[in-house]
Amino acid sequence: MIFETNTQKAGITSAGGDGSGERADRRDQPVVYFVLPCYNEAEGLVHTADVLAAKVAHLTETGRISKQSRILFVDDGSKDDTWSIIRNLHERDAHLFGGVKLSHNRGHQNALLAGLMTARAYGCDAAISMDADLQDDVNAVDEFIDGFCNGNEIVYGVRSARKKDTWFKRTTAEAFYKVFEWMGAETVPDHADYRLMSRETLDALSEYHEVNLFLRGIVPTLGYQTSKVYYERGEREAGESKYPLKKMIAFAIQGITSFSTKPLSFVTGAGLLSILVAIGMFVYVLVSLGFGHAIAGWGSMMISIWLIGGLIMLSLGIVGEYVGKIYMESKHRPRYRIETTL
């Protein structure tokens, strides 16, 4: 793992001064909540809990974090025994293990936000979000804590390599980050949702009320001083991936359309291109008639119809994505509803 520091835009400090004294105190043995969204993770959840419990025990014994730190599992409407296992873990050690049960499946991003906001409500100094499949290297947590103690408000876990990914997944991931950057949106390449966020940044995140959540794009816009910890992502311990190709594509579209309006400008460009093609075809028809080629035109007409029809459908689809988001935002529905909290 490699530790890298990067200072971004200055964040807003707490009211009543610069808040430096308060922050300094909280960085000495901070209360850290580990937030893990879970969806049908019954197969490997006990092992995940044991690994994290050992890590928390080590950090508390060495005085790195407070003994008030805990592990918070968020059940995103699982259909298996995930919640029963979380409840059993809480009964085994109510001080260490907490749980949040959403009343309905709301997706990974909403489940993660629910956990982060719960950790904030219970007064954590920092929250570390990670997946429940242990693909994220838990040993990187030590450097997360170092980054926080050194004054960083956000510490990103960034993959050092993608050697274990297939060629297709590696190529599409690289393409997504390049397109996302080209669209004018801000993100951290090769970073998923493995990160540490301080209480200040959680307060700032709570002010974002959009329904179409894409935390990988929102968090970098918060500003504050940040750093990166590079680690190697491992294999999934148990169960199946919750992000097949279909969900990955939907997630990419969600991210792009949530942070950039450039696709709308493509509609205008496509319209202009169609007009130019139409003008070209008109000139072609005139030239053909001038040379006495009266039969010419059927093929070009069919190509034009398909081209224009495709551009129209593509444009309507892009506009529809944004109209759909406006529709969802206008309802002001809650992003999640917590049924039970342990």
Image (cartoon, grey):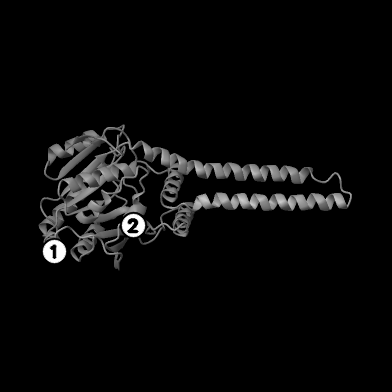
Q: Are marks 2 and 1 in contact (CB under 8 Å)?
A: no
146 versus 311 height, above or below:
below
What residue appears at the point 28 percent right and 45 percent down from the top-left corner?
113
Give the residue displayed 19% in from the left and 48% down from the top: 120
Q: Estimate the x, y position of residue 109 in percent, counting from the top left.
A: 33, 45
Q: Secondary structure at mark 2?
A: helix
Query: Callout 1 environment at 10 Å: few (<14), some (14 to 19), or many (20+)?
Result: few
Q: Quadrant of the N terminus?
A: bottom left
Residue at mark 2: 221
Q: Position of residue 159 (x, y in %)?
A: 35, 59
Q: Position of residue 18 (x, y in %)?
A: 17, 64
Distance, label 2 to label 1, CA atoms, is: 24 Å
Q: Is residue 330 left or right of residue 278?
A: left
Of labels 2 and 1, the one closer to you? 2
Q: Residues within 10 Å of mark 2 (few under 14, many from 20)?
A: some
Between 122 and 288, the one lying in front of the other is: 288
Q: Whole-percent x and y of residue 340?
A: 20, 34
What amino acid type should be assigned to the residue bearing mark 2?
Thr
Q: Amino acid at mark 1?
A: Ala
291 on left or right of 90: right
Mark 2 or mark 1: which comes first in sequence? 1
